[in-house]
Image: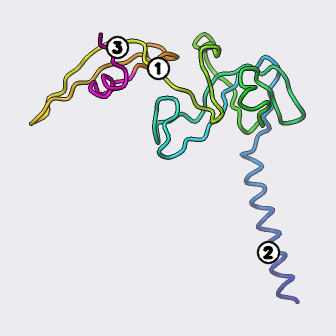
Amino acid sequence: MDKVKIIKKRLKTTQGRQKSYSDVRCRDLEFKEDDWVFLKVYPMKGIMRFGKKGKLSPWYVGPYKIIRRIGQVAYKPPELSLVHPVFHVSMLRKVLGDLSTIVPVETIEVNEELSYEEVPVVVLDRHVRKLRNKEIASVKVLWQNQQVEEATWEAEDEMKKKYPYLFE
């Protein structure tokens, strides 16, 4: 029994120490109405979300405006009521930066899996990379809900297969 008491005492000491470490890093998040937040999405291996696959898929999407606080830790953004009515505070991150870069949400159609289809708008540039035995053609594509700075280089043959209207 003495050894059990010693073990319990040491476990309690260790738990207290670990709690004090986590309390230092923990911060209470609280948002007000009309705050702008990003919504966390979970990137899954092998699934393409928001035009990117694997490691490059985004962790957060948005921004969305908070219209109402529900309870202590739940918030309601208006645009995503079809996906889910409320979101926990752990799923949200405050928007820091320039609000003029916000894309209107009416143009984005988010489905139940919190993903949407990116559609290319125009080909901005073309580049041919020469290797030893072959040439690889790439095109710089501007996507629908992105800005010019966020245009990506894609393989030309894949883009011609998926989106032939861009090359007419």
Which quadrant of the structure image shows residue 63? Answer: top right
Q: Amino acid at mark 2?
A: Arg
Gap between marks 2 and 3, in whole Å? 68 Å
Point out the stretch of residues depicted in magenta. Answer: 152-168
43 in magenta:
no
Which residue does the numbered mark 1 point to in the structure image?
119
Q: In the picture provided, is 97 more to the left or to the right than 143?
A: right
Quarter of the image with the N terminus is bottom right
Magenta-highlighted stretch: main secondary structure? helix
Q: Is residue 132 above or below residue 20?
A: above
Comparing labels 2 and 3, the label whose residue is closer to the camera = 3
Which residue does the numbered mark 2 point to in the structure image?
10
Q: Earlier in the sequence, mark 2 or mark 3?
A: 2
Which quadrant of the structure image shows residue 132? Answer: top left
Residue 166: mark in rendering: 3
Q: Is residue 93 above or below residue 12?
A: above
Gap between marks 3 and 1, in whole Å? 11 Å
Image coordinates for residue 13, horizontal then vertical, percent: 81, 68
Q: Are marks 1 and 2 in contact (CB under 8 Å)?
A: no
Image coordinates for residue 150, horizontal then vertical, percent: 44, 20
Q: Residue at x 52, y 29 (%)?
A: 50
Q: Amino acid at mark 3?
A: Leu
Q: Earlier in the sequence, mark 3 or mark 1?
A: 1
Image coordinates for residue 138, horizontal then vertical, percent: 26, 24
Q: Are marks 3 and 1 in contact (CB under 8 Å)?
A: no
